Image (tube, rainbow, N blue to C red):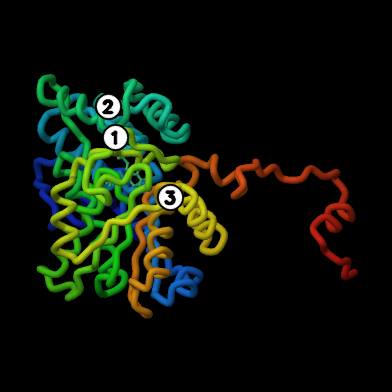
Amino acid sequence: MARQWRGLLHEYADRLNITSATPIITLGEGGTPLIPAPALSERTGAKVYVKFEGMNPTGSFKDRGMTMAISKAVEAGAKAVICASTGNTSASAAAYAAYAGITAAVLVPEGKISMGKLSQAVAHNAQILQLQGNFDDCLDIARDLAENYPVHLVNSVNNDRIEGQKTAAYEIVEVLGRAPDFHFIPVGNAGNYTAYHRGYREEITRGATHVLPRMFGFQAAGSAPLVNGAPVLKPETLATAIRIGKPASWDLAIAAKEDSNGYFGAITDEGILAAQRILSADVGVFVEPASAISVAGLLERAEAGAIPKGSVCVLTVTGHGLKDPQYALKRPDGTEVSPEVVAVNTAEIASVLGLAKVK
Ligand code: AN7
């Protein structure tokens, strides 16, 4: 019988804070593909791999942190969890809470989460409230509620989330036999940036690699507090997943950047969409806009001469394209793509497709 991947908490039980008292709440997350991307290697001269986190059970990397956070919450006796979210955390929390048989309450910014993500939270029966504010306001309230009411916070300010997410770095080292020279990653709260750095550091301590990747994080230009060096009060970007002005893991991210000789860069919304098109058309990987920023960041840094030829580069693409497909249906000039309508007629269709008859 083929062996099935058992989820992070089983696969990495010896390297996570799991005991016989921990109920393991898993949907089989982790074990995602690390896909070589020759089209990106050609463009940059680097050896490029894409870590496709959209292949997790709810379609984003959040599941890695959520299996850990919900398992530990249940272990601690929680009957309800709460999170603030730009969409993916709410989808993941809702799914894992459903599996565990506990309640999930989610706070999202009004009108600013994609329909795909909202539909997941609804499907998994979460209590969903749209706040008349942005993500940062939602997180303030979620923290307040968790401090003063019987709900367990599952945002990445909860260290269990970072612990689960660091396992992506383990998987990369296992597949490549070493850590990459550069790691490119989208940054919102900077929890995932922090988690990968921690995972790579542990791999060095364990003797699995000698390389500490330079952590290159990217934010949307209208929502780039870590690049600006100051919070953004009114963050704006079409990449709603990373529309975050006050990153919760600010200090940890700065420490990870300094330790790894890393970098924070900003990418315009146009640059994000151009990168999303390149990844889907030339590599065959469809991601949501926020995730495409890793690709945009690589192209921008390579263009700037910051990536030596032959460098091993891993790009985390954090969420699946089906989460927020609306931009894929638009051309660069903003017009809608609508496939041509044709009659049910082979000769006519062949002609439209530009095919010449061979027999
Ligand atoms: C696709 O769901 O913050 O820097 O509330 O959904 O660890 O915050 C999502 C973040 C990148 C940024 N890519 O990760 C939420 C939320 C996608 C995301 C990020 C998010 P962090």
**What residue is drawn where x is 46% and y is 51%?**
272
Residue 271's disc is none
Q: Is residue 201 left or right of residue 331?
A: left
Residue located at (20% from left, 53% from top):
194
Which quadrant: the N terminus? Answer: bottom left
Give the Cα separation between the discs numbered 3 and 2.
34 Å
**Which quadrant contains ligand 1?**
top left
Q: Residues within 10 Å of mark 2 (few under 14, many from 20)?
A: many
Q: Which residue is mark 2?
A: 104
Q: Which mark is residue 268?
A: 3
What amino acid does circle 2 point to? Answer: Ala
Say which label, 1 or 2, has the lower sequence index: 1
| Residue 22 located left or right of residue 111 | left
Determine whether label 1 and label 2 are within 8 Å by CB: yes
Q: Quadrant of the C terminus?
A: bottom right
Secondary structure under tag 1 reads helix
Is residue 220 rendered to the left or right of residue 153?
right
> Which of the two marks, 1 or 3, is nearer to us in this view?
3
Residue 131 higher or lower than 89, as above or below = above
User: Residue 303's x, y, as percent?
Assistant: 42, 69
Q: CA distance from mark 1 to mark 2?
A: 7 Å
> For numbered disc 2, what is the local secondary structure?
strand
Q: Residue furthest bottom?
A: 310
Q: Residues within 10 Å of mark 3 (few under 14, many from 20)?
A: some
Residue identifier under label 1: 93
Quadrant in the rendering for residue 94: top left
